[in-house]
């Protein structure tokens, strides 16, 4: 388990405490759980954004994939798919 010490604005701290209290209740470790959940969500969203951007670039290049098959637009038209 890692320990990170951070400084945030009073406004952000109040939002964090209020949201954690509503969602997770009160008690020991609630803020840590809330921050961990937020960091994981942020990282997952960032990863999904990277995947989407990579796929958009591939589509712009005319490359598509369907499971294990990879093909380009010309191959689809040539085969009449």
Image: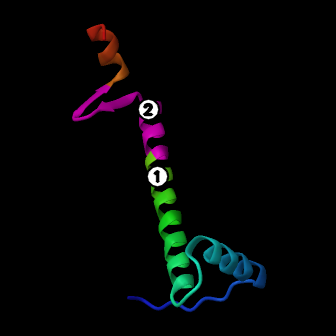
Residue 63 forms part of the magenta stretch: yes
Rendering coords of residue 79 (x, y %): 26, 10
Residue annotated with mark 2: 59
Report which quarter residue 7 is drawn in.
bottom right
Span colored in magenta: 52-71
Residue beneath the point at 44% across and 32% down: 59
Rendering coords of residue 2 (x, y %): 42, 89
In this rendering, would 19 be left or right of 67?
right
Residue 70 forms part of the magenta stretch: yes
Residue beneath the point at 47% across and 68% down: 40
Q: CA distance from mark 1 to mark 2?
A: 16 Å
Q: Residue 47, relative to residue 7: is it above or below?
A: above
The 10 Å Cα crowd at callout 2, few under 14, some 14 to 19, many 20 or more, is: some
Rendering coords of residue 24 (x, y %): 56, 75
Q: Nearer the viewer, residue 72 or 44?
A: 44
Q: Quadrant of the C terminus?
A: top left
The tag on residue 48 is 1
Report which quarter residue 18 is drawn in.
bottom right
């Amino acid at each position: 388990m890692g320990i990170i010490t951070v400084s945030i604005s009073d406004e952000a701290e109040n939002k964090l405490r209020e949201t954690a209290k509503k969602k997770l209740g009160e008690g020991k470790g609630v803020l840590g759980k809330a921050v961990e959940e937020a960091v994981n969500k942020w990282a997952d969203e960032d990863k999904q954004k990277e995947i989407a951007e990579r796929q958009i670039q591939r589509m712009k290049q005319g490359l598509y994939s369907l499971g294990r098959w990879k093909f380009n637009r010309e191959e689809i038209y040539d085969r009449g798919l």
